[in-house]
Image (cartoon, rainbow, N blue to C red):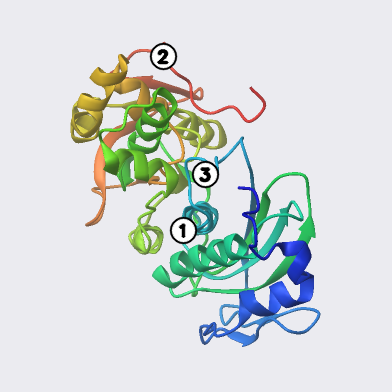
Amino acid sequence: MGSDDGAETLAGVGEFEVIDRLVAGRDQPSVVALGPGDDAAVVLAADGRTVVSTDMLVAERHFRLDWSTPHDVGRKAIAQNAADIEAMGARATAFVVAFGAPADTPAEDALALADGMWHEARLMGAGIVGGDLVSAPQWVISVTALGDLDGRKAVRRGGAGPGDTVAVAGQLGRSAAGYELWRTGIENFEELRQRHLVPAPPYGQGRVAADNGATAMTDVSDGLLADLGHVAQASGVGIDVSTHALGTDRDAVADAAAAVGIDAWEWVLGGGEDHALVATFCGAPPDGWREIGRVLDGPAHVLVDGAAWRGNPGWQSFD
């Protein structure tokens, strides 16, 4: 987004005044002992361990400002980082954000970005405790997420065993569907279009999975099969996914797939950025989770209905 005539810009307002506006009036959660305003924040970690993850969003690569509002971008930046914390069986407590943008960026866009971040953080009871603001040739957002295990053992990718149940919390295929609808200019299916702009991780279900003995877990950022491939590799097992169990996901995007002219399974199995959670359990999955497959003996591989999948393998960062 460029500067409108007469609008305040980041350069015109100045770094420190913009930062003051970004942090003014924000209520921090109880885990934040010291918020923005000093050289660093202080965040309590009652568990004695801190779960840490970081991710970046780059304009034209991870979002487009002719599709997304700054508020949407802010929500997405927080959501995708929070999903990584959820996937460890933890709860997100705080976020640190670095934002780079051209000097002529309207100051109101930076404020809307921050509002979106705070909107999403509040959904999980977390806060934004600090960050940085720099000049850059395009929008770049880097988020570091902090989380607390609350005494739980971290759920890793490498614990799945043969005979385990594979289960999902959240929805699949929606973001990929929305992307194609935006790309092809099809203006119907507004809910799917919006889901590409703002994902909906199943907040709290990572802790539910951990409390119910999840043996392995990850979030679906690159695509269901790609991310299950990480679990299979780390655990040294095979995984077989049932399309019958994923029928509701296919049905949800089938009409959009027909409008675009694509097989809906490409989105459900290979589409990324839904930030659902996928986990393995020794028995039946808990409430909020649905069974979608089984863990097999190794070597590491992922099957669909007992056969190799020949379609979209999922997101590749450097393609």
N-term mark: 2 or 3: 3
Residue 229 position, x and y percent, is: 49, 29
Residue 90 position, x and y percent, is: 49, 65
Q: Nearer the viewer, mark 1 or mark 2?
A: 2
Tell me the crowding category of disc 2: few under 14, some 14 to 19, or many 20 or more residues within 10 angstroms, Cα based: few
Residue in front for this viewpoint, 94 or 168: 94
**Residue at the spot 78% in from the left edge and 84% down from the top edge:** 38
Residue 71 position, x and y percent, is: 49, 58
Mark 2 highlights which residue? 311
Residue in front for this viewpoint, 270 or 100: 100
Label 3, label 1: how far apart the Cα atoms are? 13 Å
Would residue 31 be seen by someone viewing this image from the given angle? yes
* Numbered disc 2: secondary structure: loop
* Residue type at the position of mark 2: Gly
Q: Which mark is residue 157?
A: 3
Mark 1 highlights which residue? 86
Residue 80 position, x and y percent, is: 51, 51
**Residue at the spot 33% in from the left edge and 37% down from the top edge:** 174
N-term mark: 3 or 1: 1
Residue in front for this viewpoint, 138 or 200: 138
* Residue type at the position of mark 1: Glu
* Numbered disc 3: secondary structure: helix
Q: Which mark is residue 125?
A: none
